[in-house]
Image: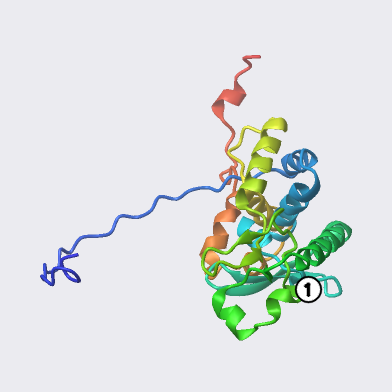
Amino acid sequence: MYKEVLKTPVGDFSFKHSKIGKRVPDVLSRKEVKKVLIELKGESWLMASLLYGCGLRLIECLELRIKDVDFELNEIIVRDGKGNNDRQTVFPDLLKEPLQIQISKAKIRFKENLSINNFHSASMPEALERKYKNAPKEIGWQYIFPAKKIGIDPRSGILKQHHRHESFLQKAVKTAVLKAEITKNASCHTFRHSFATHLLEDGYDIRTVQELLGHKDVRTTMRYKHVLNRNKFNVRSPLDNLDLI
């Protein structure tokens, strides 16, 4: 404020910046992931399965478009991920048929919307829409998980199709975690943490996991190795040596 607003130099204080404390991410075991997914149905099950099976962030899953799924190459392309980067990630065979069904539903919704007056089609970033003017009405640009109702874009005042709201899956996952009687502080993002941790447990290279997650710095990915280092000192508690029970 002094330097940029008041234009008053204050000199060098020569102090060290405080460090952010380390936080261990919450991770579900494979059995716990299964218990939560069993409690989910329909679109919420498919979305959560994508978060865990592909390591997606919640918004990355919701913003998936039909063109981003390659059934031939078995991969999903994440567009404009964190840091404005694209990346490729794995595509579980288990989700191929359910995803094809969901895409079919999205195509039907798109055709129904075209009959509505003043409907402009899928919402897109302004710069991208100016560059590809016909893209919003192309089938490949439609959201895989469209919102139940079309809405007016506040910027342009035009009727557009947006993706599902984040709260849809957040509420479903919260309810599923409670039903599964899991006491961990699990959320949608916990599936991504579990994806990374379980891949490392299976012996996959840290660099491979880094690319699948879209991390710029491998140190960000390294935090998931905490699971591999549980009880790294191989210490047995002295309490376990007492015959109390």
Residue 123 against residue 184 in the figure, above or below: below
Q: Position of residue 142 (x, y in %)?
A: 73, 69
| Image quadrant occupied by the C terminus | top right
Say which of 216 and 104 sits in front: 104
- Could you tell whether 7 is left or right of 35 in the image? left
Q: Determine whether the residue tagged by mark 1 lies in a helix, strand or loop.
A: helix
Q: Which residue is mark 1?
A: 139
Say which of 67 and 182 sits in front: 67
Residue drawn at (61%, 47%) of the image:
167
Q: Position of residue 21 (x, y in %)?
A: 40, 50
Q: Position of residue 85 (x, y in %)?
A: 58, 74
Task: Specify the quadrant of the image occupied by residue 214.
Answer: bottom right
Q: Residues within 10 Å of mark 1 (few under 14, many from 20)?
A: some
- Could you tell whether 97 is left or right of 161 in the image? right
- Total marks shown come to 1
Does residue 42 show up? yes
